[in-house]
Image: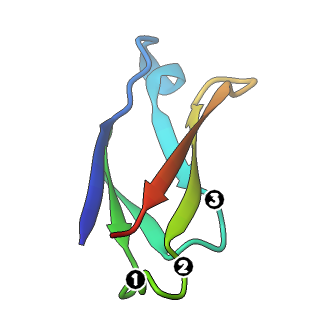
Amino acid sequence: TVVGLFNVRDRDSGANGDVSLEISPDVPFTIRSLQNHFSLVTRETLDRESTSQYVVELIAQDGGSPALTTTLTLLLNIS
């Protein structure tokens, strides 16, 4: 199930403008990508009675040297 859609971009040219997106470990979600468009997708069925809330960190990194990163923290409430 798709939980969220993200467009991540870096206005630099060449490899410096390439962006990757990673997700915090130990959450039942994964990231799927197509160029600079990403979707947050469930890896398994979510059970609100066992876990009603998840803190998910998304870490974006560019292709520069040194690489620059930024982090977005999402609070997902399961209903």
Residue type highlighted by circle 2: Thr
**Mark 1 Cα-neighbour bin, 10 Å: few <14, some 14–19, many ≥20:** some
Q: Secondary structure at mark 2?
A: loop
Q: Secondary structure at mark 1?
A: loop
Left or right placement of residue 15 versus residue 9 in this view: right
Viewer-closest of 77 and 41: 77
Looking at the rendered image, the quarter that the N terminus falls into is bottom left
Residue 71 placement: quadrant: top right
Residue type highlighted by circle 1: Leu
Q: Secondary structure at mark 3?
A: loop
14, above or below 59, in the image: above
Q: Tell which tag, 3 or 1, sits nearer the viewer.
A: 1
Q: Which residue is mark 2?
A: 51
The mark that comes first in sequence, 3 or 2, is 3
The mark that comes first in sequence, 3 or 1, is 3
Residue at image coords 45%, 70%: 29
The mark that comes first in sequence, 1 or 2, is 1
User: Is residue 9 visible to us here?
Assistant: yes
Circles 3 and 1 in contact, beta carbons < 8 Å: no
6, above or below 55, in the image: above
Q: Which residue is mark 3?
A: 24
The CA span between labels 3 and 1 is 17 Å
The CA span between labels 3 and 2 is 17 Å
Circles 1 and 2 in contact, beta carbons < 8 Å: yes
Q: Give the percent coordinates (x, y) of residue 25.
A: 66, 67
Q: Which residue is mark 1?
A: 46
**Mark 2 Cα-neighbour bin, 10 Å: few <14, some 14–19, many ≥20:** few
